[in-house]
Image (cartoon, rainbow, N blue to C red):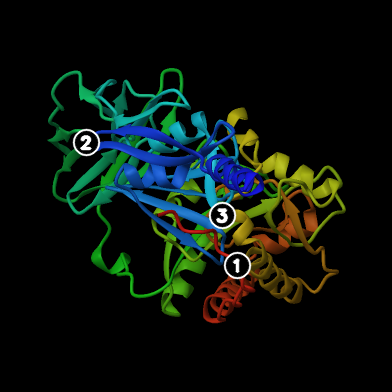
Amino acid sequence: MRRVLAIALLSLLLGASAVHAVGVVTPQGKAEVFAKGGLIDVVELLRLSGAQVAFAAAAGSYTASLAEHQIQFTPGGSLAVVDGRLSPLPGPIRALEGHVVGAFATAAALLHALGWTLSGTAEAPILGRTNAGEQIEVAVVRTPAGATVVVRGSSQKPRVSPAAGVVKLQYVTAVQLARPIPVAAELLGGELADNVLTLRLAPGVEVTSTYNLDEPPRLVLRLGSTQAPAAVAARSGPLVVLDPGHGGEDQGAKGPNGLLEKDLTLALAKAAAAQLQSAGITTRLTRESDESVALADRTALANRLTAIAFISIHANASPAKGVRGAETYYMSADASDHEAAAAAARENASAPPDTVQLILWDLAHVANLNESARLARSIQERLNAVQGIKDRGVRQAPFVVLTGATMPAALVEIGFLSNAEDATRISAREEQDKIVAAITDAVVEFVRTPRPTPPPSPSPAQSP
């Protein structure tokens, strides 16, 4: 009898120790959430905020959506994609006993991206909505290039959503207007509702580009006339984003004949976009003219458009004058060789230091690694055939412009402007046509070839 009682008591103790949960205070009441060793179930907290959380088995990643916000994260990583932009987390997210957990600060960062706060302590968390805080101010500045809208006062980088006649700025947390929105020939005013600022544009006006500036933080929206209807193709299927490297003050490499990389890449990208459109593939460029576009904004555009491929077009340079030929890269935290590292350093020169530190990309990029390699190889093989020289190969390097892409992405260096022979060759219209054909043929093949089915992988247990 004594033995039976001891076994029963031991079973009760083991059962009690196996239960790990904390009571989370929410606006709807108290809820039990799995927690253990200072870690808490981030998926369940996101669901308590009202977010829709989906798990992609093929990529091993989670997507949480709430209102117009979306975050993506992968267990094992310490980064997230917040509204299309790469963002570091205070600590890693990991799988534990069938749950997806993170430290209290990590959970708070994820919730903050959806407009919620996690306060209190790890033992007694409190979940609540974020209160309005920052005061923003809208101004219209006139430059030789036209009208520019500048939004000051917030360190947040809002999600920019242009539409016909309006542009919406979706802030992570609620903001307030310091003064009324001005009215100008291009800007007809606007309104602020919670964390969404809507600016009304005059007929025939659209946002041509956006970028963020620091010290002080501000968002810049360049305005221009709308394109002719024929120039804007309606999306009816897969969409590809082409990125003409450099632009504006950043001219890139310069050939001995005076050819600038920024001009060459824009011409090639426009020609490639026209050919892809003719092939039935909707295509967008990250820049349509000689303008500055932040490296992070380039992949952010592709993420917002849910593109199926992102190709950044560049021309190379090297201190070794005899080096020539095309190279194609895909993303890696480590360069495959010293030449790849040098190429990445040159292309990353315009990025602020904190952006370069985010290159340790371990989220959606991991899921697209093989497909990025396939895209890069397809481009490189065709460029080899065009140039008829020894294959310089497909390489890996930490390019900022590829960081944060949630789709297969590659960067192609079409040749070396530092090499007189290469520079002369790629300056010729006939050679440029061949390069454009090589890139577009590779993209068409990539788009139309079914993506390989990933091997089955165990799915984490679903939270109740």
Q: Where is residue 218 in the image (x, y as percent from the top left)?
A: 37, 26
Residue type at mark 2 is Leu
Q: Mark 2 points at which residue?
A: 197
> Callout 3: few (<14), some (14-19), or many (20+) C-alpha neighbours within 10 Å?
many
Dot 1: what SS? helix
Q: Which of marks 1 and 2 is in front?
A: 2
Residue displayed at 26% across by 23% down: 136
Q: Is residue 417 visible?
A: yes
Disc number at residue 429?
1
Residue type at mark 1 is Arg
Q: In this view, does 392 lie to the left or right of 106?
A: right
Q: Name the residue under label 3.
A: 364
Q: Nearer the viewer, mark 3 or mark 1?
A: 3
Disc number at residue 248?
none
First in sequence: mark 3 vs mark 2: 2
> Callout 1: few (<14), some (14-19), or many (20+) C-alpha neighbours within 10 Å?
few
Residue type at mark 3 is Ala
